[in-house]
Image: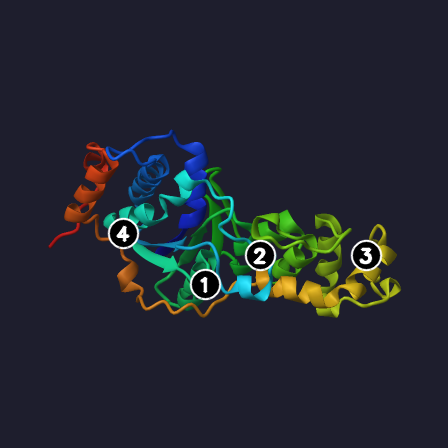
Amino acid sequence: MKIHLLDGTYELFRSFYGAPSRLSPSGQEVGATRGILNSFLSLLRQPDVTHVACAFDTVIESFRNQMFEGYKTGEGIDPELHGQFELVEKAVRALGITVWSMVEFEADDALATAAAKWIDQPQVDQIVLCSPDKDLAQCVVGQKVVCLDRRREILMDEAGVVEKFGISPASIPDWLALVGDAADGIPGLKGWGAKSAATVLASFQHIEKIPANPEDWGIKVRSAARLAETLENHRPESLLYRRLATLRCDVPLTETLSDLEWRGALLEELEAVSTELGDDRLLQRVPRWQEE
């Protein structure tokens, strides 16, 4: 079997900026929620989609905000997008999909935990992390745990991570620490770019293994002396940034593998959601209903 793990927060943002605007009968903007429901219903029609879960950032802030003041917050989020956070979680639950609502942790932490939890289950052939988020590349293992960009239909296994980033999945947090990640508020180190970080980490894998003296690197890197000096002057910060970029695998997920099996949508709950959205055609698009 395959397990499909959905990054609900990414899907919500993508739908908000990609799907048509729609107002509910009460006047609330619901276009993103309708877009996600249509997208997920399409996914659930695929024959190999049998076990599914979706993680959401119920709030944007997490434990990482206590570690670093500059980490991402909910400030600046469009109110019409933020106003759909609760609604979309309710809607996805009504589809019969297991939903993980993250408050202390982040959605990516839940996905990383789930991948680690079920990777060794003999009945699991593959775990598909449905997100193009580069953070999740650190979770990729061979062809057993892969990332799927559903929009572009690109599947990335471990060889794909190496081809795209120039490093193994284990070095992704180090790479993000050096290069930075604007989406998460990780500034990175000045002068370190994607290519230079990949070249150095391909040889040393982790930040603490990078020699202070660039002459000991044994590789050609442009402006190596300047990069080495920057790293030495900011090594503690770089290690903090790596902690921020490292996904947690200890989120308390209580579900069993059987709980992730998609048995159909919940009629009463989805009827209520359909009424709230003002979408009377939603129920007609459901491929299966959960039996009593």
Q: Are marks 3 and 2 in contact (CB under 8 Å)?
A: no
Residue 67, position as x, y percentages in the image: 58, 66
Q: Nearer the viewer, mark 3 or mark 1?
A: 1
Q: Secondary structure at mark 4?
A: helix
Quadrant (top left, top right, bottom left, bottom right) of the N terminus = bottom left
Mark pair 1, 4: CA separation: 20 Å
Q: Earlier in the sequence, mark 3 or mark 2?
A: 2
Mark pair 2, 1: CA separation: 13 Å
Q: Are marks 4 and 3 in contact (CB under 8 Å)?
A: no
In percent of the image, x 11 and y 55: which residue is there? Answer: 292
Residue 241, position as x, y percentages in the image: 64, 62
**Is any part of residue 168 visible from this angle?**
no
What residue is disc 4 on? 93
Q: Secondary structure at mark 1?
A: loop
Q: Earlier in the sequence, mark 4 or mark 2?
A: 2
Mark pair 3, 2: CA separation: 24 Å
What residue is disc 2 on? 71
What residue is disc 1 on? 105
Q: Are marks 2 and 1 in contact (CB under 8 Å)?
A: no
The residue closer to the viewer here, 94 or 262, is 94
Q: Is residue 16 left or right of residue 191?
A: left
Mark sitting on residue 227: 3
In this view, 211 is above or below 34 = below
In this view, 113 is above or below 165 = below
Neighbour tally class for label 3: few under 14, some 14-19, many 20 plus, Cα within 10 Å:
many
The residue closer to the viewer here, 132 or 257, is 132
Mark pair 3, 1: CA separation: 33 Å
The residue closer to the viewer here, 237 or 212, is 237
